[in-house]
Image (spheres, helix red, strand yellow):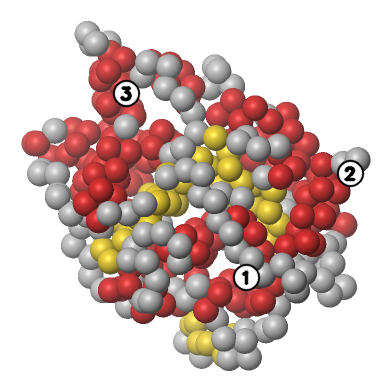
Amino acid sequence: MASGIEKIISNHEASLTDNNHAYVPKFSYKRYCVTNLRGGIGKSTLSFNLAYLMACVKSTLVSDLCAQGNLTDSLNNRKDDLSVNIYDAIQPRLLGPAFGDIPEDISYLISGKNDEFKGIKASYFVPSSPNLFAFSSSLYQQLQLASTQADSAKKVRNILYTIKTTLDQEADLKKCELQLIDCSPFYSGATHLAWCASEALIIPVRVDEHSIRSLELTLDMLGNQNSDFNQWLKRGGDMKPPKVAAIAMTMVGARSNVKKSKDRASLSFIERAYAVANKYRHLFDKEPDEAFAITDDFTSSGRISGALGIPIPKLQIGKSYTIEPKKRLEVYDANKKYRKELEYLASLL
């Protein structure tokens, strides 16, 4: 019987074979969240491409809860002014009418802001806001206050469901079947509420030391009954944490000199990530070795995709794109591999 790491490598290699073109997404859940307590791992680019693959199948509501707004920039690649954002909706819902009215419509048709999403299912996005950087203090003040009042469990639960309630209403308004949330690399504030809003998590893990540590921190936050996250779930009336639907290993093979191979360091980090996941196997909705997806260093394709808001499956091989003043990057044949890796990741959901 193959070991866990052998199964992960075998699944990846099988997903790249020429006769394995079938992209069969299951989408076992309605609400997904892309999260990792570490920045600089290409999370927003991954979220952008998953959003495209989801929208190819079902109408999807995509929400950017990272204050940096990189996903918003990719979805709004026309750089139009956006008059409403997620903060406008959750701040008055959390603090009351003195902080403004709750807007009735907070999302934009993606194909109206990004031509690459035309011709697929009508999908929408809720923009980010820099104000999310300061949201944590307001949130925890309200949670502490609610926990001391009569009927505290209901009041705490209502606060923890601030984002869930907001996005569910928007999804119903726009008739979206799926939701995808992109989070900041910090647990507190909007990320905390995004976890409460989600049924399943997608956790990107870059092949480096800091990412392995952040994976363990993330899974411990989810699985440790004494963690801040679980303590608030208990105070909200024994609310349930989300399941882990997928671990996406990123930047695999970036340092290999051999075409289509994985360098030893990458393999070592994949093995370590699997060992961490196996410690928390009860958090997964499948066996941990079946939850791993390996993605290469997307190199120029990833940089073009994120900077210009063009999904990797729509990049033209052999074409050059300008992403910065006077900086041109070419899309190479490896883009076919990247697309299959993304499709395999989506198939785990």
Mark 2 is surrounded, within 10 Å at the Cα level, by few (under 14), some (14 to 19) or many (20 or more) other residues, namely few
Q: What secondary structure is found at the residue carrying circle 1?
A: helix
Vertical comparison of 67 with 135: above or below: below
Residue at the top extreme of this rendering: 150
Dividing the picture into quarters, in which one does residue 176 lie?
A: bottom left
Q: Mark 1 or 3 closer to N-term?
A: 3
Where does the image place residue 5, in percent across and percent down from the top left? 83, 46
Kindly report the distance in space between the C-alpha atoms of the residues bearing marks 2 and 3: 43 Å
- Single out the mark in the foreground, 2 or 3: 2
Kindly report the distance in space between the C-alpha atoms of the residues bearing marks 1 and 2: 27 Å
Location of the N terminus (image quadrant): top right
Residue at the right extreme of this rendering: 1
Q: Is residue 233 visible?
A: yes
Where does the image place residue 282, in percent across and percent down from the top left? 65, 27
Q: Which residue is mark 2?
A: 2
Name which residue type carries label 1.
Answer: Arg
**Label at residue 339:** 1
Name which residue type carries label 3.
Answer: Arg
Left or right: where does residue 102 sit relative to residue 85?
A: left
Give the camera-side residue of 20 and 250.
Answer: 20
Q: What secondary structure is found at the residue carrying circle 2?
A: loop
Q: Mark 1 or 2 closer to N-term?
A: 2
Q: Which residue is mark 3?
A: 157
Name which residue type carries label 2.
Answer: Ala
